[in-house]
Image (cartoon, grey):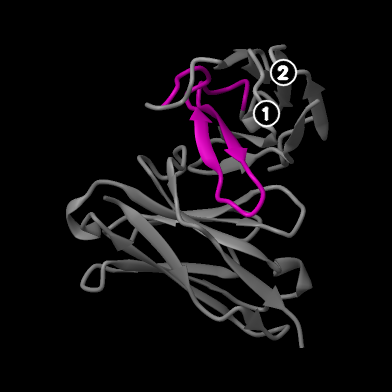
Amino acid sequence: QLQLQESGPGLVKPSETLSLTCTVSGISISSSTFYWGWIRQPPGKGLEWIGSIYRSGDTYYNPSLKTRVTMSVDSSKNHFSLKMTSVTAADTAVYYCARSWSPAGTPDFWGQGTLVTVSS
Amino acid sequence: QSALTQPPSASGSPGQSVAISCTGTSSDVGGYNYVSWYQQHPGKAPKLMIYEVSKRPSGVPDRFSGSKSGNTASLTVSGLQTEDEADYYCSSYAGSDTRVFGGGTKLTVL
């Protein structure tokens, strides 16, 4: 049974780097043909696609976030990660990891999400 | 790349039908048949309800249906039930391996 679980600091200071990990269970990242992505949702607001990564390490980013975002995959730990640099209060959001069938395909299975607050 | 436009709210009485619109451009909604819809209850992760404009994942009631005309997609919920009260988000492939979401619509079952 597929499960996605986000983890990482819930509080990040302005100008610092946000780092999150999504641990995948129930399927092997290295042997699947899925794409693994991140979507965020500021409190009380809509969803924003951040990007996705394939098992090979190929990445696909939202153009508006591309300069600050880096995704990576660690098949040995069966997890993938998100780093976002130079964060501001506008980056405060619930961050979800999700699975899709293509680089920017429909995310069809989501983690429960984790709230990251940017504040000093 | 701008967010898709959805009405902030919609409502209907139990048993009625309600349609929620999602307007984009020819670069996203109008250019591809890759529109999807999500239902989100408070404090929960979004749940996929419709993909590729009108297809339903296994387990989604057939009361939920999707369609598209030009740059506007629609989600119709028929036979409204109290548990349908939630936020609904549309999403579309936007070319160049990117995706865009709508701002969300709060559906109230009166």
Position of residue A93 measured from the top left corner of the image (x, y, whole percent): 67, 64
Circle 1 is placed at which residue position? B82
Quadrant of the drawing holding the C terminus of chain A: bottom right
Q: Judging from the image, what secondary structure is the residue with disc 2 in?
A: loop
Residue at the image position 62 percent from the left and 25 percent from the top: B29
Position of residue A65 measured from the top left corner of the image (x, y, whole percent): 62, 61
Residue at the image position 72 percent from the left and 41 percent from the top: B3
Whether B110 is drawn above or below A69: the answer is above
In this view, the residue in front, A108 or B72, is A108
Verify CB contact (< 8 Å) between mark 1 and mark 2.
yes
Q: Judging from the image, what secondary structure is the residue with disc 1 in?
A: helix
Circle 2 is placed at which residue position? B14
Magenta residue check for A106: no
Q: Which residues are magenta?
A: B29-57
Magenta residue check for B51: yes
Q: Chain of mark 1?
A: B
Residue at the image position 65 percent from the left and 82 percent from the top: A11
